[in-house]
Amino acid sequence: MATHWTLGCDANDPHRVAAFWAAALGYVPEAGYDDPDGASIVDPDGKAPAIGWLRVPEGKTAKNRLHIDIRVAGEGPWDLAERERLIRAKVPELESLGATVVREEYHDDVIGHVVMLDPEGNEFCVA
């Protein structure tokens, strides 16, 4: 049996970042967690790990050593045209939530993923 785990993160504004990721992932705020210096979101189906943020005074200064990838196309094998359509549909949705596009990555002339930044500048990919 796998061990349950939570991804713990730092943020200048934990509630803003948690709200972004909740919308991006379809998560909800963790019931009973009410901390002005922290925020936690959970999978409403209870299957995926929780993600929590704690307020820290310093800003982000370097590339993430760990990041979340959003896999809108699910697990392979993929219909490459449908996969690209799903990626291209998700990116503007995330931009409307405060994310920024950094670049598109291609493999053999087919989009592999889009690198983005969350509202606090943390890198993540949409694949």
Image (cartoon, grey):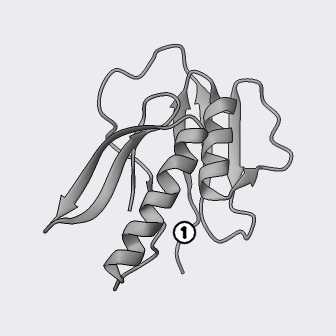
Circle 1 residue: 3
Q: Is residue 71 visible?
A: no
Q: Position of residue 126 (x, y in %)?
A: 41, 56
The secondary structure type at the circle numbered 1 is loop
Observer-nearest of 76 and 95? 95
Q: Position of residue 60 (x, y in %)?
A: 40, 23
What is the residue that sits farthest to the top in this orientation?
Answer: 57
Residue drawn at (52%, 38%) of the image = 9
* 62 displayed left or right of 12: left
* 118 displayed left or right of 44: left
Residue drawn at (55%, 20%) of the image = 56
Residue drawn at (59%, 65%) of the image = 4
Quarter residue 61 falls in? top left
For label 1, count other residues whose C-alpha is less than 10 Å away and answer few (under 14), some (14-19) or many (20+).
few
Q: Is residue 120 visible?
A: yes
Quadrant where the C terminus sits is bottom left
* 90 displayed left or right of 24: left
Q: Position of residue 84 (x, y in %)?
A: 37, 68
Q: In the image, what residue type sits under mark 1?
A: Thr
Residue drawn at (20%, 59%) of the image = 106
Task: Decide: is 44 above or below 58.
Answer: below
